[in-house]
Image (cartoon, helix red, strand yellow):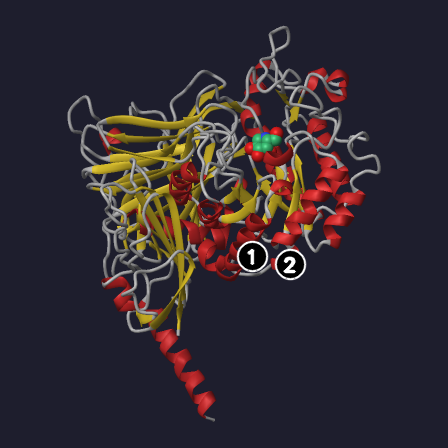
Amino acid sequence: MLKTFSAAFVLLVASLVLSAQPNAASFDAVAKVFRLDGGGSSYRFGVNPRGELQQLYWGGRLAVADGFRQAEPKPEWASFDSSYNNTPQEYAGWGAGLFTEPALKVTFADGNRDLVLHYESHTAVANGFDVVMKDISRKIYVTLHYKMDPESGILARSATIENREAEPVTVEQAAAAAWALPPDHYTLNYLTGRWAGEWTLTQEPVYPGARVIESRRGSTGHQANPWFAIQAGDPNEEHGAVWFGALGWSGSWRITVEQDQLDQVRVTGGFNPFDFGYVLHPGERLETPVFYGGYSADGLGGASRLLQHYELAHILPRTAATAGEKYPRPRPVIYNSWEATEFNVNEAGQMVLAEKAAALGIDRFVMDDGWFGQRKDDHAGLGDWYVNKEKFPHGLKPLIDKVHSLGMDFGLWVEPEMVNPDSDLYRKHPDWVLNFPGRPRSEGRNQLVLNLARPDVRAYVYGFLDKLLTENQITFLKWDYNRNWSEPGWDQLSPAEQKRVYVAYTQNLYSILAELRQKHPNVEIESCSGGGGRVDLGILRYVDEVWPSDNTDPFDRLTIQDGFTYAYTPQIMMAWVTDSPHWLNKRTTSLEYRMLSSMQGSLGIGANIAKWSPEEMATAKRLIAAYHQVQPTIVQGELYRLISPRNGSEFSATESVRADKGQAVMFAFIHSTQEGLGFPILKLKGLDPTAQYELSPMEGKASVETPAVASGAWWMNHGLEMDASFRGDFQAAAFRLDRK
Ligand code: DGJ
């Protein structure tokens, strides 16, 4: 009886609270204003009297009663700056003298290049709208898709462009969305890098003019990542307004951040217009990628926590085993053979590694490059996806069976989109690669890029992968991609149509991944591109994890991992422990330091464990067991970057707090102490101030004064103090707090 009453009461209160909240998406028909609300943010746009879709507001959540009048276009500033330019449009066509970045630019069959899009109609969809726009005279229709996540307030935006003219139209530029920010002084944050040096957080003021972040490479790229965060004022980790966005596209992309002559800031992103030209035939549609945008009042840390949770809840795929679960499961702890054996893999050698891996408590054994075709080094074999009989005389089965008998599952490396000229595949199908007939074919790592846009290539790639997964008990594919495009011709198509490759290639990549996952619903996939060259919210719809960098130096990794987490969840951030001295920097570090550096993400071991001493085996085994206990908190919790390793910092520290605030895990690293100064006291964050938490070291010691148990308030205000012995070069410590 009491139970029934309290359930009814809860329902009543819940419905009262709900009725006080606006719907996540609503339309004010009088003012012609669209309202989207979710989490701590609101987004408003409307139809102005000219018929343009005009952005009205993007920022912290507004009150229910806050209304907006109909959008009023900004006036002409001078004869040089028209109202069309000055008005922040949701999706501006290039026409009517637009000088800011257009969302859409087309050429019609008769040579007309003027495009002015006006509102036509809209339909409500779950948590959003589809808003149809049309050119003022031509039958070019653009449907803008909006979907607001009620929990995080992250808004997913994209566009569908449709040609209902009688003649083809060439799309020369197509954004997924344009975002507008009010005039202010801003800092732009974006991620740059290179092979073995990805994920540098680059910070600079937003200046008048445009800052272009892009890839022209046919894939996402190591050099820049399609993510931005713009903070009002100076950068701050835990305070201040931040607008952020991430583009879900693994082909050539561009994000333009511009401050116009009236100090208005716009961010426009989508397909890279460089060398772009998509012929839309009558009746055809072009879907843009999705551009996700969000707002946080809690600095860059708050912004990244929102995005990380959104990725876990709404982007990353599920396997059959985790279908319907809120988050995907934490990654198995893996062993990978690459740095131990490189191309020199064989049955006996891999079995030895597998035995040692199992003894460490590893969950998944992954054999990397070298198992197929005539693959002795990187000069031959790519494209020939049959098992090399010299290395594996009885096929893969004996090794896979052995791995299973040791209690691990089995994963395999593939690089499906590439071919070595020295391969049976290339000898048979030299026309299958990206090329312009009669022109040189530039190689990278002795390989060429298969034109995945071609139906026959797509069929071949899907076919061999499906066969591999059907005939072998493989639960994981490491999908590598080790060069960028050159000579991107597609000579099956007419010259006018060939640039379609920029869209069709990536669409086929996604569709192969989707089809494989559907047919093999328990197989998991990693996106690797010589490290972090293909990480974005597009590929993350189809893969469970990524390889952030070929640079496995544990000290370099601290900065790489710090940068990575501004845009992506630690869940997908694979981090291997490899041998010391490290091959790249020749740096010597302790196994404890290497383990803790990798334990900040999804842990793996990539060292030559066949040579490890009993002491090394024991240390790694102990720390893998400790990691297993707290892994969900580290990879799915709330991440606080307490001390940044950037800019030559001698210290760094992170804290991850479980969603229910019941557990926290802290990592602390010293590069090199100077003048005897010890590690700063770590003021923890995100705990329940009234709860009692017990401190347990995973590695290292707290100061003798540190209580074993104290309140959340104590850990956050007094802080966690390291033992005085915690000093020197390349030192690491890790602790956990558990609510009593
Ligand atoms: C590049 C990857 O990033 C490495 O981890 C390894 O898989 C090699 N390719 C293999 O060729």
**Disc 2, SS:** helix
Of the four image quadrants, the one with ligand 1 is top right
On the image, numbered disc 2 is attached to which residue? 321
Occupied quadrant, residue 415: top right
**Measured from the top left, where is residue 160 in percent x and y?**
49, 37
Which quarter of the rendering shows the C terminus?
bottom left
- Relative placement, left or right, of 133 versus 386 is left
Q: Are marks 1 and 2 in contact (CB under 8 Å)?
A: yes
Extreme residue in the bottom direction: 1
**Measured from the top left, where is residue 250 in percent x and y?**
51, 34
Q: CA distance from mark 1 to mark 2?
A: 9 Å
User: Are there few (<14), some (14-19), or many (20+) residues within 10 Å of tag 2?
Assistant: few
Extreme residue in the top direction: 438
Asked if residue 276 is positioned above or below residue 479 in the image, the reply reads above
Q: Nearer the viewer, residue 400 or 153?
A: 400
Q: Residue at x 61, y 12 (%)?
A: 441
User: Where residue 346 is drawn, which disc sits there?
Assistant: none
Amino acid type at circle 2 is Ala
Instruction: Name the mark nearer the viewer: 1 or 2.
Output: 1
Asked if residue 104 is positioned above or below residue 187 in the image, the reply reads above
Q: Nearer the viewer, residue 471 or 461?
A: 471
On the image, numbered disc 1 is attached to which residue? 329
Q: Residue at x 49, y 31 (%)?
A: 220
Q: Nearer the viewer, residue 327 or 399?
A: 399
**Disc 1, SS:** loop
Residue 669 in view here: yes
Occupied quadrant, residue 380: top right
**Measured from the top left, where is residue 202 in percent x and y?**
32, 33
Q: Nearer the viewer, residue 343 or 7?
A: 343
- Of the residues under marks 1 and 2, which one precedes in the sequence? 2
Residue 143 in view here: no
